[in-house]
């Protein structure tokens, strides 16, 4: 019985988090949140399924991924510059 209560609490937590993200976050933040909460899902799933899960088009997902890659490259570059200053 305790196992089922614990399982139900976990399910409620996940669903409430997902509802919160859909209501209050733009698509880029939802993708970043998914990267933090479930990175294994991103590695094992096709982009069209990830886009469907996030309720965006696959083209929007592609643009978000490119923007995140550029941002991470810029941060890496800034870290290198800061190291030499």
Image: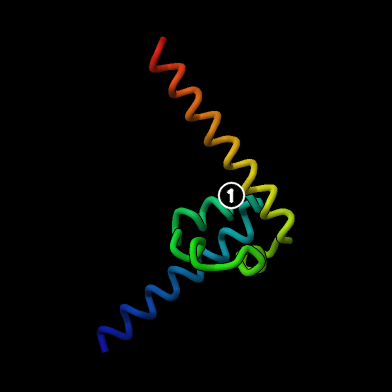
Where residue 47 appears, x then y in whole percent? Answer: 62, 63
Local packing at callout 1 (Cα closer than 10 Å; few below 14, some 14-19, many 20+) is some
3 vs 61, left or right, is left
Secondary structure beneath label 1: helix
Residue drawn at x 57%, y 58% as measured from the top left = 21
How are the residues colored? rainbow
Residue drawn at x 38%, y 73% as measured from the top left = 10
Give 40 or 25, whichever is nearer the viewer: 40
Give 75 or 22, whichever is nearer the viewer: 75
Give 54 or 19, whichever is nearer the viewer: 54
Location of residue 28 with respect to 85 vertically, above or below: below
Residue drawn at x 54%, y 50% as measured from the top left = 32
7 vs 74, left or right, is left
In the picture as drawn, the residue positioned furthest to the left comes out as 2
Which residue is tagged 1? 29
Location of residue 73 with respect to 33 vertically, above or below: above
Quadrant housing the C terminus: top left
In the picture as drawn, the residue positioned furthest to the top comes out as 85
Looking at the image, how many numbered discs can be counted on the residues? Answer: 1
Where residue 33 appears, x then y in whole percent? Answer: 51, 54
74 vs 79, left or right, is right
Where residue 12 appears, x then y in whole percent? Answer: 45, 74
Where residue 82 appears, x then y in whole percent? Answer: 43, 17
Q: Quadrant location of residue 1?
A: bottom left
């Amino acid at each position: 019985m305790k196992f089922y209560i614990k399982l139900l609490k976990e399910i409620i937590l996940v669903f409430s988090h997902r509802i919160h993200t859909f209501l209050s976050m733009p698509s880029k933040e939802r993708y970043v949140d998914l990267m933090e909460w479930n990175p294994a899902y991103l590695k094992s799933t096709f982009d069209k399924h990830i886009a469907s899960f996030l309720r965006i088009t696959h083209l929007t997902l592609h643009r978000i991924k490119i923007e995140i890659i550029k941002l991470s490259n810029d941060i890496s570059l800034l870290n290198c510059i800061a190291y030499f200053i």
